[in-house]
Image (cartoon, coloured by chain):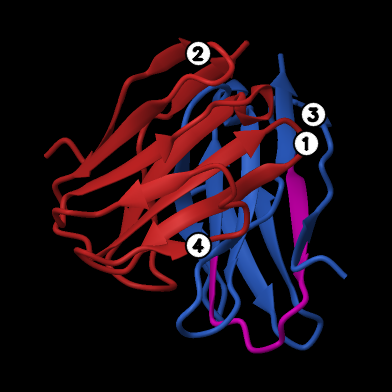
Chain colours: A red, B blue
Amino acid sequence: NAGVTQTPKFRVLKTGQSMTLLCAQDMNHEYMYWYRQDPGMGLRLIHYSVGEGTTAKGEVPDGYNVSRLKKQNFLLGLESAAPSQTSVYFCASSYSWGDEQYFGPGTRLTVT
Amino acid sequence: RKEVEQDPGPFNVPEGATVAFNCTYSNSASQSFFWYRQDCRKEPKLLMSVYSSGNEDGRFTAQLNRASQYISLLIRDSKLSDSATYLCVVSPQAGTALIFGKGTTLSVSS
């Protein structure tokens, strides 16, 4: 049982480049989430999904897109990276709303 | 009032000390409460859920006060390995995502 995994672990992008972050979970959870964590800001919800084929905006969705084509995977895309998107990105999953969330190890993204 | 508020600290304590963290939440309809632990440059992990009757797990005790809308975490006999950031987490109401506090940093020294 790998739990929640994230790919890649580190990435450096130039302004304007695009990339996709992959999150995978093997716990058969319906709910998946993408957060960003910045110093002094805590965890902020970017997008989430309540099941395969569904996505919804969180607190800070601008500049990001997501897709949930398979139940076990949740992709986060940056179409045109900006320095303000330099952050640590965490994926999480849970059985349902209000349940414990399991986090992946994070992706450290730097946009120069 | 912010949805979930924590004293950011840092709390600097010697080994063996007892330390307590409080967290306040704004939504009186909140249903689930948790404490997560996050080590430096790592992901958050569940430390313990917080039940209405209070609960204890070894050196850790969590309590909920619905009337005053706060939860607390007590750590007894602090260890060096307890050094981390402790996140207060609240489910504001049914059908909504968890809200994470910004965390309280604990540093335990020898």
Structural crowding at the residue carrying mark 1, measured as other residues with C-alpha within 10 Å and reported as few (<14), some (14–19) or many (≥20): few
Secondary structure found at label 3: strand
Q: Nearer the viewer, mark 1 or mark 4?
A: 4
Residue at which label 2 appears:
A13
Pointer 3 and pointer 1 on the same chain = no
What label does residue B71 carry, if any? Answer: none
Q: Are marks 1 and 4 on the same chain?
A: yes
The reply to whether dot 2 and dot 4 touch (C-beta < 8 Å) is no
Mark toward the start of the polypeptide (2 vs 1) = 2
Residue tagged 4:
A57
Q: CA distance from mark 3 to mark 2?
A: 40 Å
State the residue position of label 3: B13
- Give, as a three-letter code, the residue at label 1: Gly
Read off the residue under disc 1: A40
**Callouts 2 and 4 on one subunit:** yes
Image quarter of the N terminus of chain B: bottom right
Residue type at the position of mark 3: Val
The residue under the point 35% across, 37% down is: A104
Q: Amino acid at mark 4?
A: Lys
The chain ID associated with circle 2 is: A
Q: CA distance from mark 2 to mark 1?
A: 23 Å
Image height of B92 relative to B88, above or below: below
| Mark-to-mark CA distance, 2 and 4 | 24 Å
Say which element carries label 1.
Answer: loop
Comparing labels 3 and 4, the label whose residue is closer to the camera: 4
Which residues, given as a range, are shown in magenta?
B18-33
The quadrant holding residue B93 is bottom right
Q: Chain of mark 1?
A: A
Q: Nearer the viewer, mark 3 or mark 2?
A: 2
**What chain letter is assigned to the residue under label 3?**
B
